[in-house]
């Protein structure tokens, strides 16, 4: 971005969830929050006292699954020592007038992504990353089958203290819950509404738009069209089966979404070959991010069609994806109070910087 780029100050409506909007304000004076210094990352390979490091398996709750096997694991899944949701405990339904509570049953598991303590996602091999997502898929399948009351299984990763990671060893988590979380509910609901009106999946439409965007360059003298170029201004990375895009209404400066190019409603439907290409796109996108902002701390999470009868008709309208949200600043009272996210870098400029990285 050059200094003389005219500042943008606009409110962008999230095309999928119109009730969400983002203030894109690139003018210097609009910066309402302070960018955090990236915390020094723990890059050690092995830490004797770390419960997730290889050889310390007795320091965690028992292994649920290990890949390729328990003795020489590369990925290991264990119960969370401090689950936010747990197995059934007999609890009388709490009804307090207008305030209602649902018993917090569910499952909370930790996926130790890699045996190497401080490795970042972009440093893992494509084959390994594909296996991490295969492990999520397998646990989702098993958990959904184990309990029909589970409506949603959220797989996510917090990387770095600014993203809420309490243990430095690389890991992700799976939380299986009896409710559909609001973010997912809204996406599924609004994309269904869009489908009813246009007979199109809005995510597929957004991918098409990103891929076919054309810029027309006119000759200044004659006013005639000089050339048309395919800019693909929101595309960060494109694989054979997946695409990484910069959302038009990005809440976070460096937010990226990865989606299957072919319509697919639920993540567990992705086959091994899909996940191989997914891993390649993820690794390349994360490498770009690392070279642009260095030492990114981020959250990523999978959004997939919930297991709920309420959404049984949403297979053609919902499209699973991974959202990657780098945490480069702290939300202020303005954002918390208004619900309006503030983004100080235009998504187009951010996409351009990410794309420009030579891999
Ligand atoms: Zn460790
Ligand atoms: Zn679609
Ligand atoms: Zn989403």
Image (tube, helix red, strand yellow):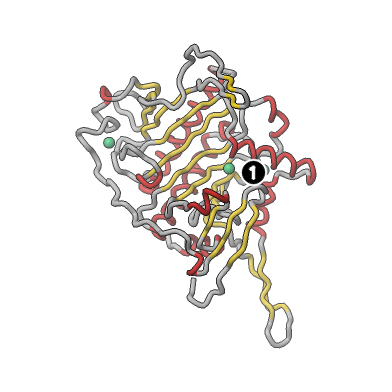
Q: Identify residue for label 1.
A: 262
In terms of image quadrants, where is residue 45? top left
Farthest residue, direction front: 97
Question: Is any part of residue 22 visible from this angle?
Answer: yes
| Quadrant where the C terminus is found in the figure | bottom left
Farthest residue, direction bottom: 221
Farthest residue, direction left: 48
Left or right, 343 with reference to 71:
right
User: Residue 76's x, y, as percent?
Assistant: 36, 28
In terms of image quadrants, where is residue 211? bottom right
Count of numbered circles in the view: 1
Q: Is mark 1 within 8 Å of ligand 2?
A: no
Is 64 situated above or below 326? Answer: above
User: Residue 162's x, y, as percent?
Assistant: 38, 47
Is 62 situated above or below 48? Answer: above
Farthest residue, direction right: 197
Q: Residue drawn 41% across and 25% down?
A: 83
Left or right, 213 with reference to 94:
right
Question: Is any part of residue 238 visible from this angle?
Answer: no
Rendering quadrant holding ligand 1: top left
Q: Residue drawn 47% across and 53% down?
A: 332
Q: Residues within 10 Å of mark 1 (few under 14, many from 20)?
A: few
Q: Residue drawn 27% across and 46% down?
A: 43
Q: Residue drawn 29% across and 39% down?
A: 116
Is 310 situated above or below 208? Answer: above
Residue 309 vs residue 241, the one in the foreground = 309
User: Residue 193's x, y, as percent?
Assistant: 74, 41
**Which element is circle 1 on?**
loop
């Amino acid at each position: 971005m050059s200094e003389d780029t005219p500042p943008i100050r606009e409110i962008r409506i999230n095309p999928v969830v119109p009730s969400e909007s983002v203030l894109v304000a690139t003018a210097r004076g609009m910066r309402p929050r302070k960018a955090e210094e990236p915390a020094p990352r723990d890059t050690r390979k092995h830490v004797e006292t770390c419960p997730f490091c290889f050889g310390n398996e007795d320091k965690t709750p028992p292994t649920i699954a290990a890949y390729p096997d328990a003795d020489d694991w590369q990925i290991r899944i264990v119960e969370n020592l401090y689950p936010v949701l747990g197995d059934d405990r007999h609890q009388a339904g709490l009804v307090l007038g207008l305030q209602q509570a649902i018993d917090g049953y569910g499952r909370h598991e930790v996926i130790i992504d890699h045996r190497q303590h401080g490795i970042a996602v972009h440093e893992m091999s494509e084959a390994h990353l594909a296996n991490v997502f295969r492990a999520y898929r397998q646990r989702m399948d098993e958990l959904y089958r184990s309990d029909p009351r589970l409506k949603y299984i959220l797989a996510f990763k917090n990387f770095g203290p600014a993203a809420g990671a309490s243990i430095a060893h690389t890991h992700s988590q799976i939380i299986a819950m009896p409710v559909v979380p609001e973010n997912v509910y809204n996406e599924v609901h609004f994309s269904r509404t869009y489908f009813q009106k246009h007979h199109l999946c809005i995510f597929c439409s957004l991918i098409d738009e990103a891929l076919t965007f054309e810029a027309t360059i006119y000759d200044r003298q004659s006013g005639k069209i000089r050339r048309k170029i395919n800019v693909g201004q929101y595309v960060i990375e494109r694989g054979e089966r997946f695409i990484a895009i910069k959302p038009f209404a990005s809440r976070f400066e460096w937010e990226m979404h990865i989606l299957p190019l072919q319509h697919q409603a639920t993540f567990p439907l992705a086959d091994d070959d899909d996940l191989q290409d997914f891993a390649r796109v993820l690794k390349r996108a994360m490498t770009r991010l690392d070279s642009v902002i260095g030492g990114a701390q981020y959250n990523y999470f999978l959004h997939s069609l919930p297991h709920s009868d309420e959404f049984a008709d949403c297979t053609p309208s919902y499209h699973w994806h991974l959202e990657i949200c780098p945490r480069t600043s702290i939300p202020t009272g303005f954002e918390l109070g208004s619900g309006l996210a503030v983004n100080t870098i235009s998504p187009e400029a951010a996409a351009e910087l990410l794309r420009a990285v030579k891999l």
